[in-house]
Structure formats: structure tokens, C-alpha cells
Amino acid sequence: MSGTTAEPAARFEVPPRPRTWPRRALIVSALAAFTVATCLPAIGGVEIDLGAIARNWRHGAANLSALLQPNWAFFPRTVQPMLETLQMAFVGAAIAAALSVPLTLWAARPTNPNILTRSAVRAVVNVFRAVPDLVWATILVAMVGVGALPGLLALVLFNVGIVVKLVSEAIDSAEHPYLEAARAGGATQHQINRTLALPQNLPLFLNQWLYALELNVRISAILGIVGAGGIGRLLDERFGFFAYGDVSVIILEILVVVLVIEAASNILRRRLA
Amino acid sequence: MTLDTRAEAGAAPASAWPIRLDGVSVTYPNGTAALRDVSLTIDAGEMVSVVGLSGSGKSTLIRAVNGLVPVTSGTVTVGPYTVSGLSGRRLRQVRGHIGMIFQGFNLATRIDVYRNTLVGRFAQAGALRGLLGVPTAHDREVALSALHTVGMLDKVWTRAGSLSGGQQQRVAIARALSQEPSIMLADEPVASLDPPTAHAVMSELERINTERYLTVLVNLHLMDLARQYTRRMIGLRAGEVVYDGPAAEATEADFEQIYGRRIRPQDRLGDRT
Amino acid sequence: MSSTVEARTRTTATRPGVALPPRPSRRGQTAATAVVGVVLLVATATLDVEWADLRDLPAAVRDYGTLMFADPDWSRLPRALFEMWRSISMAWLGAMLCVVVSIPLGMLAAHGVGPAWLRLALRGLFAVIRAVPEVIIALVLLTVTGLTPFTGALALGIAGIGTQGKWTYETIETLRDGAADAVRAAGGGRTAVIRWALWPAALPTLLSFALYRFEINIRMSAVLGLVGAGGIGSMLANYTNYRAWDTVGMLLIVVVATTMAVDAVSGALRRRIMEGT
């Protein structure tokens, strides 16, 4: 076997192998250097402290076992905050859906040929998207006070960013032959958007609105941690009292609700397709 | 039927307009010269075919007539208007008088036939109705009778995307007819259709030309369709007019001159039956 | 051709007053829209929000906007950059951990790679992890490892496995089967199929997803900082509590600029990877 593989090398003129290894070595060493730099506490990197796990293991194991024993008696007290969370998620997604329509049509090339307004909308949306959801909530709580309102506003801002970016990109990459026909017939851009582009692209919108709703359920569950209402506030409070049995009930509840919403929206999505 | 007499009557709807190109050149931003110094006059009520291979400039020629492609130099005149140099509201107004149908039908596929046809009424809508997208009773009447003319009235609530190619092209013709145009442009209207449907659509165009008395300018790449349905034929090659004369008298040699190569079987569609 | 002839006779017969055919019923759709509308109204009405507060919002946005951005406190920039690097480190290490764990698990969860029982178990695990918000994973972890950036990195690593694993098996399953069949036809076993057919074909997509995970983690690491994991998020939470708005403004600028820069670089790299250069 080895004889037959060795022979052709001698008989055939093998073209020289392209030299890819210096490039590859460069990339690998750059990645390695970056990773090392992220592990240096002196410059702000993360101190990988596996010892802490070993030291705190007993303590952690006790907490984990407490978490595995849900205190079901606590359940009735979670219902009201959970409802508030779902309400915030749903209302936030709905407001964001309404706002996203004009903004998306402004941010997509086929529905807004004006490069100035298009880039302006995109730039604003990108800046808003770069602020994480809970950071929005923190700032808004400081601005308008503790409660559901800052949570709702944070969800709306966050959703609008996602929907506008994803849908406008989807519109950009799709073909829109009807645009040329409508232009040839003397239509204004507004007429085209209102009667053709919006209904034609409605499935793209519906898809992302559902996605925003799913994300909202997940996010609104934790918004309360920074004081923005919903079940997160209860979660934070119980954590503060080390009431791990209660915390466990809340986490399980969030898990179930998220899974149910996700399943429901998957069914809806399949029906819409 | 000279240019001047027709131009005076041009303002009245549904009367044919002449088309005149004077030294028209179109160079695209990437440097491609699509039309080179083209001058021609098409009388009101004529049915003219433009024949050439893809890349010969015939799509550019037809789009220069309604200003979808701006000309680099020269002037384009339709009826009483000079298209070249117009923009905004004035250009849309002129386009309202010029119907256009496309190779790919260019319908909004997820939208019903009715609303696709109403697109032809956009140019006539007043500011408020245009904003709200509400058609008048007259708009509805015109759109429906256009659908009736092409025999598609019974499909009025069907989504355009679920129609066959021939049916879609009929809806596209109804859309153009509901503009009550003075000129009908057709860019390779039958290139995506099977032979019997192609003949039906060409007959439809022929009928529009004679019954509605419209100027019809149709792009074709098939020699027999040009001979059969149009009286005058313009041959384009590399952006220049290489033939202009009666379609029926065009010889094989003329076509070889237009195509710049020998005639092949695929240059003919085949007979009606 | 008969339709043309037919149409022609109809035209001449009935031009005036063509009636609009009745619109087909869309009762189901209307009912669904109505239900959503009613639920939305009830949810909005019963939501415990002082809508009147919204009237003060424009003024508040202007006031706080001025406080934050009129004259940001740049004297704390070095500290902010230090903390930002800590957040970036959390995000990077979290992404590495996540990818290293989820690629083998995700591959085993793909159709035609692992056995059916393992596939179902892994997919269930991914679904459960996906459903738990990152912050909650961090809260649970910090009972074990304490309030440190290391906890943050671990939380990001674990929280991402759900989505990353799903993307991995979906990537493997959308690969065309030709190469895998060819390896099987040549007598290759499961390992050979993974090594010579699936891995090379899936690698660019998986690398691109790994970078995408890093982008997501950049945002998440700031959030974890808010609950005490350290980094720019902790600094932001502190200065918001002190109501030191000029510093908060500076921190927000740092967060936004860094996030957009990372998005831009990582996005460009992802495009290059997918184009195969």
C-alpha cells in the first residue's frame, strides 16, 4: 500500500503546493494573542479563577440544591407580576410594530431612493441598536422613575432597532419588479409604498414582529432587576433574601412561558408562510 | 398624421401621441454606451417593433421614452411634452399618459389583481387620495373595464402571484390600459411566455393599437413576431439604428445585419398553431 | 386563442358599468385580527402605567440628554476603557467557551450524525438553555463563583450554547448530502464522514456564527455588568446610581462606539469568511 502511494510522487510532476501556512500562522497567532490579552487582569482582562470554583464548590452546591427544590407555595404570588411581564412584552411589541413600519420603509433602498434620509434613519437605528436592552432600562428608570413605563419604553426602543434593521435588509435584498412598473405608470414613492410595497412585504414584517415578541418575553422577565417592572423585580427581591426555593419557581415559570410563546409563534409562522 | 397636428390634440386622453427622438445618447454610469446618437420619429397611432439582441440597447430605448432611463444627450419628445429634462411631478404626469408592460410582468405577487390594476390610476390621484390610497368611483370603473377588456375580470380578487404567466401579462396590460394612455410601450412582452400565449398577447397589443388608437412601441428579439404583428420595424445593434423600414419586407439579410450573425432557429417563435 | 375572441366580443357589448365581483370572504383573518386587537386593548388598559407620565418624557429626554451629552466627563475615560476591555474579554472568552462546547454537541445533534436518543436529548437541552435569560444563568452561577468577570464569561459561554448548538446542527443539516454520501460510499465511518465531509463544508458558516456570537456577547456583557459581573456595565450602573450624568453620558458613548466598531470589524470578517478568502 505504502509503495503505491510513494511511487506516483516520483513519477508525476506535482505542482508546488500554494504557500498558505504563513497566512494561517499569522491568523492563528493573532487570535492567540487576542485571547491571551483578554486573560490579563492587569489591563482589564478576565482573571480565570478556577480555584474559586473549587473553593466555593460546597457553598455553590448547597445553593444549587436549594434551587432544585422549588417552593410551590410561592407560586400564587408570582402570577400577577408574570402577567405584568407578558403585558409589557405584548404592548411593547405592538407599539414597536406600529413605529417600525414607516421607519423600515424609510431605511430600505427600494422604498426610499433618497440616500440622505435613508442613511440618516439607518445611522440613528444603528446607534440605538448598539445600546443593550437592560442598559436602556437602567437609564430610563433613572429618567422616568421605577415602574412598568421605563420597561415598556426600553422594549419599544430595542424592538424598533431589531425590526427596522432586519426587515429593511430583507427588503433591500429582495427583487421588486413592481416598483419599475408603478414608476413607469407615474406613481409617487408614497403611493407605491402604501399600496404595493407594504402589503407585498408584510410577511417579512410579521415574521420579525413575532420574533420581537419572543425576545420581549425573555427580556421583560429580567427588566425588573433594574427596577423596570414585571416578574424580574420579584426575582431580584427573592434573590436578595436568598430564598432560592422561590427563585426556582420563578425561573421555572419563565422557562415555561418562554417555551410556550416560542412554540405558539412557530406555529403562527408556519401558517403565515 | 403629422407630428404637429397630433401634438395639439395630445392633451385629450386616449388619443395617440407621436414619439420623437433627436440625437439621443445614453451612457450608463459604468461607462456602457447603450444608445449612440439615435434619431427617429414614430407617428401617432403607429405600431412599431424594435428588434435586436439583448444588449443592443432596445430596453434602454424604450425606457428613454418614459424617462425611466435619463438620456445623456439629445431630446425625447412625446406628444406635447419633452421628456428629457423633466423630473418629479411633471415627469410622473407625463408617465401617466404612457402605459408600459414588461417581460417579467412586474406585478406585486402577493397582492390581488384588483389593486395591481389600480396602480394604473395612481398618476391621476389627487394629493389627499394619493396619500390615503383610496380610489374614486371613476378609478374603479376604469380599472374594472380594463380588466374586462383583457378577460381577467373574474380573477379580480386572486393574488397576482398565483396566476399563470399569460394571465399575469394580461393583468399587466390591464394595469397599463387603466392609465388611459396615449402611448403603449412593451419591453419584450412575450419573452417569458409559451408560443400560443405569446401570440395571444401580441394579438392583444395589435387590438389595442387599432381599437383604442394608441401608439405602440414593442421590443422583440424574434424576427417572425416582428414581421407578423408590426408594420414598421426598427433594428438596433450596439446602440445604433441599423434598420428602419417596413417589417414585412425585412429580408433574412436584414435580420443578419441586425443580429450581427447568421439566423438561428431560436430567432423564430414558430407559427400561431 | 378563443379567450381573445371571447374578450373582444365582451368589450364591445358591455363597456359601461362593469360590476365589481363580490370579494371572497376573509372571515377567519378578520376574526384573528379582532382577537389580537381586543387582547391588545385589554393589555394596554390594565397595564400599570401612568400614561400621563409620557407627557413629561420629551422634556425629560431633553434635560437628561443635555446633562449626559452636553459636556461628557472625559476625565474618567481611561477607567472606562479599562472596564470596556474587561467587558470585551468577558464576551470573547464567553464566545470561545460557547463555540468549543456547542460545535461538537451541535454536530452530534444533527440528523445522520449521532444516534437518535442523543439527538433528542441534546436538542431538548439546547431548547431549555435558549429559554433561560442570560442574566438568570449569571445570577445562578454567581452563587458558585462569586461576583467576578469570570462568572460573566462562564454565564455568556453557557447561555450561548442553546442558540449556538441549534445553529450548528441546522448548518450541518442544510449541507448537501453528496460529500457525506461519497465518504460513506468509499467505506468511511462516522468519524470519517465528520472529518472529511461535514467539517470542511460547514467550517466557514460555523466560524461566521462564532464571530456573530462574539457580537451578541459584547452587548450581553454590558448587561451582565449591570447585575454585578464587572466591566463597563457595572461602572454604568454605579454612576447611574450616583446620578453622575456627565460620566454616564461618556460611558454610553464608549459603549455605543465600541459596539458599533466591533460590529463593523466582525461583520467585515464574516463576509470575508463566507466569500471564502
Image (tube, coloured by chain):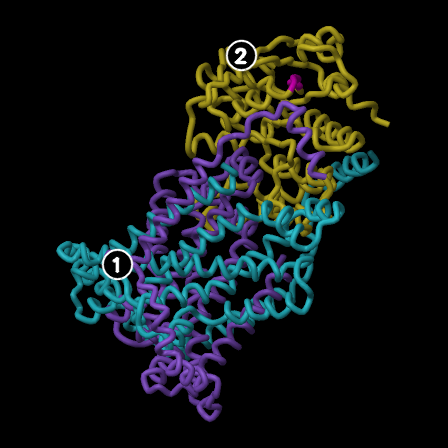
B204 relative to C228 in the view: left or right: right
Question: Residue shown at 62%/70% (left/top)?
Answer: C121
Front one among A34 and C33:
A34
Q: Are marks 2 and 1 on the same chain?
A: no
Q: Relative to B128, does residue B19 appear above or below in the rendering? A: above
- The percent coordinates of residue A269 (x first, y second) are 60, 61
Q: Colour of chain B?
A: yellow
Disc 2 versus disc 1: nearer the observer? 1
Front one among B258 and A74:
A74
- The percent coordinates of residue B106 (x first, y second) are 61, 38
Q: Relative to C150, does residue B236 appear above or below in the rendering? A: above
Gap in Å between the C-alphas at discs 2 and 1?
69 Å
> Is residue B49 shown in magenta?
yes
Front one among A90 and A243:
A243
Residue furthest to the front: A3
Chain in cyan in the render: C
Residue B38 marker: 2
Q: Is mark 2 on a helix, strand or loop?
A: strand
Question: Residue shown at 34%/64% (left/top)?
Answer: A48
Image quadrant occupied by the C terminus of chain B: top right
B180 relative to B155 in the view: left or right: left
Question: Residue shown at 49%/34% (left/top)?
Answer: A20
Looking at the picture, which amino acid does disc 1 mark?
Answer: Gly
Chain in purple in the render: A
Looking at the picture, which amino acid does disc 2 mark?
Answer: Val
- The percent coordinates of residue A12 (x first, y second) are 66, 24
Residue A44 marker: 1
Q: Which chain carries label 1?
A: A
Magenta stretch, residue numbers: B48-53
Q: Give the quadrant of residue B44.
A: top right
Q: Mark 2 lies on which chain?
A: B
> Is residue A265 shown in magenta?
no
